[in-house]
Image (tube, rainbow, N blue to C red):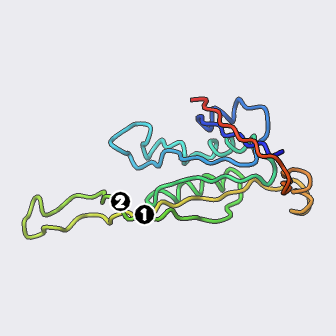
């Protein structure tokens, strides 16, 4: 039987209180882009740029478990450094591509008609997604999987649940 549970909660609070183990974490933390001037998204105090955030979030991860972390193109480097500094391995960067982004810039043409259509920034077209892994605890990846990974079989029953803790 395959048992899949989804938890919807603040990742740090969940990780600090959860007593079990998880195979993966998918999270979309604040980006540090000062979205609409909100304090929770300030660049200077962004929780995603703190090593302690990722140390906490990785606590319930099984050895070899993965984190999928959404970020912003402008501040992705800060997120990546914090994750790496916490002891997690950077495995890859995925991209969520889209064509509907709005430029986060000033329209210079509003102040000077000679510059109509010119702005101070590019239209975003992607959101980077960091793939990180908790280091394995066994000598080889095969031994680590044998010890810590789920083994799915084709005749396994499928049971899924979702838990909203927020």
At x 67% / y 42%, what residue is drawn? 57
**Residue 9 location, quadrant:** top right
Tag 2, which secondary structure?
A: loop
For residue 39, side relative to residue 68 (left or right): left
Residue 86: horizontal and vertical position, in percent? 68, 50
User: At x 38% / y 45%, what residue is drawn?
Assistant: 34
Residues under numbered marks 1 and 2 in contact, where contact means CB atoms less than 8 Å apart: yes
| Left or right for 128, reference 14 | left
Callout count: 2
- Density class for disc 1 (Cα within 10 Å; few <14, some 14-19, many ≥20) is few
Q: Which secondary structure, mark 1?
A: loop
Disc 1 to disc 2, C-alpha distance: 7 Å
Indicate the quadrant where residue 15 lies.
top right
Label 2 belongs to which residue? Answer: 101
The residue carrying pointer 2 sits among few (fewer than 14), some (14 to 19) or many (20 or more) residues within 10 Å by Cα, namely few
Q: Where is residue 60 in the image (x, y as percent from the top left)?
A: 75, 40
Q: Could you tell me which residue is drawn at 12 percent across and 69 percent down?
A: 115
The residue labelled by disc 1 is: 98
Give the left or right position of residue 57, taking residue 139 as reference: left
Write down the quadrant of residue 40 in the picture. Answer: top left
Query: Residue 82: x percent and y percent?
Result: 60, 52
Nearest the camera: 43 or 61? 61
50, 68: nearer the viewer = 68
Q: Position of residue 23 (x, y in %)?
A: 76, 48
């Amino acid at each position: 039987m395959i048992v899949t549970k989804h938890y919807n909660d603040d990742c740090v609070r969940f990780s600090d209180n959860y007593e079990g183990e998880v195979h993966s974490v998918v999270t979309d933390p604040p980006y540090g882009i000062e979205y609409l001037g909100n304090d929770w998204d300030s660049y200077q105090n962004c929780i995603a740029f703190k090593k302690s955030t990722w140390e906490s979030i990785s606590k319930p991860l099984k050895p070899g478990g993965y984190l999928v972390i959404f970020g912003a193109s402008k501040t992705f480097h800060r997120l990546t450094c914090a994750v790496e500094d916490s002891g997690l391995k950077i495995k890859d960067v995925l991209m969520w591509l889209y064509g509907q982004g709005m430029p986060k810039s000033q329209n210079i043409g509003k102040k000077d008609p000679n510059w109509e259509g010119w702005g101070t920034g590019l239209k975003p077209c992607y959101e980077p997604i960091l793939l990180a892994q908790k280091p394995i605890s066994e000598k080889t990846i095969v031994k680590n999987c044998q010890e810590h990974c789920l083994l799915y079989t084709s005749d396994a029953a499928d049971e899924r649940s979702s838990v909203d803790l927020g």
